[in-house]
Amino acid sequence: MLLKMNDLEKYRKIINTIDDKLISLISDRINAARMTMSYKLSEKIDLFDYEREQEVINRIASESNLDKSFVSKIYNEIIKEGKSQFQSELSEKMIIAGPCSIESEEQITRLAKEISLLGIKYLRGGAFKPRTNPKSFQGLGQEGLRMMRIAADEHQMKTVSELVSCSQIDEFYDLIDIIQVGSRNMSNYELLKYLGSVTAEDQKPILLKRGFCSTLKEYLYAAEYILERGNPNVILCLRGIRTFEQKESEMRFTPDLSSILELKELSKLKVLFDPSHSSGASKYVVDLSKAALTLGADGLIIETHYDPSKALTDGPQAILPQQLNEILRYL
Ligand code: PEP
Ligand code: MN
């Protein structure tokens, strides 16, 4: 019996030694994958490559005589861990990208894929568009939100979309991970109160955009309406204000970049910047994004489309998914 126990100890020692090596090799492999992703980012190459992942798994399975489904299970987990570690490094800043409006299943599916390949985890898309002109495209509504939910889930992304009424909040709650309150609704206090109460339990994040004619004090009071009802997860978002510049300027609004500095002093809430609505012109979006990050913005929300000229809303301010790369590299 004593001899048997000693043998058991011996075998366990061997196993422990193998485990130590195994874990250290897995961690080396994850680090190598992270280095590869950094390189890809700097060279503007898509971060993820599903074909290459399959190639890796197939090669090991065939060379090791292990069952493919077993190899596949282990490697999928290791690969997933590498990606998620890399993404959390990136996601110290919250980068949200996607079209102004969800236009079709094909459009949102393609954009979700292209944007997620860059390592971006938040997909935006409007379904209820608060349009100045009632004849303009108003958004696909519920159908659009469904399309975006499916597209986002496929790439493990979170959805960001605007709701404009209390009944929509009830109806579409589960389709949206971060509920946006648009600039035109920042002073809709009933909506803010309702949203605050409904989200108090699960504390779903609310992206509250600054009213384009509101002062920072008015803006922070609006945030307070949500906060005081028990949801601390309010994310502020500067999106340009209307000033005398608009009498002549080509910019749709005046980018309120300096407000990043003040808001960061006045509040503990996350402050995002929207370079797309701020300027209304795609040629300024990358530089404004860099400026916002330099001034300490906690993230960006950027309108992105693979064919801006065909976008149903806000095409002139949309950038291409590849252009997001330049902003990510700047990070
Ligand atoms: C939007 O994000 O699509 C939008 C309408 O923004 P804002 O409310 O800032 O105009
Ligand atoms: Mn828009």
Image: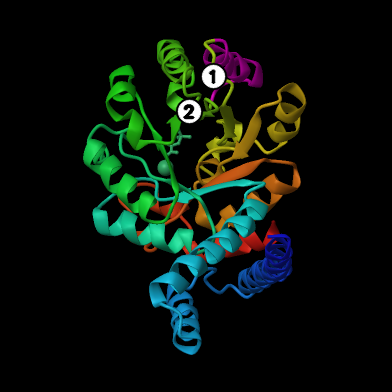
The stretch of residues the image draws in magenta is 213-228
Along the horizontal axis of the image, is 228 left or right of 173? right
Crowding at dot 2, Cα within 10 Å, few <14 / some 14-19 / many 20+, comes out as many
Q: Does the magenta stretch include residue 202?
A: no
Residue found at x 47% / y 78%: 57
Please state if 62 lies on the left or on the right of 248 as rendered: left
| Residue 65 drawn at (x, y percent) | 45, 85
Whether residue 87 is visible here, answered yes or no, is yes
Residue highlighted by disc 1: 231
- Answer with the quarter of the image where residue 298 lies: top right
Percent from the top left, x then y, of residue 86?
63, 59
Give the camera-side residue of 67 and 45: 67
State how far apart marks 1 and 2 are (Cα).
8 Å
Q: What residue type is labelled 1?
A: Asn
Looking at the image, do the residues carrying marks 1 and 2 touch, with CB atoms under 8 Å apart? Answer: yes
Secondary structure under the numbered disc 2 in the rendered image: loop
Query: What SS does tag 1 mark?
Result: loop
The residue tagged 2 is 204
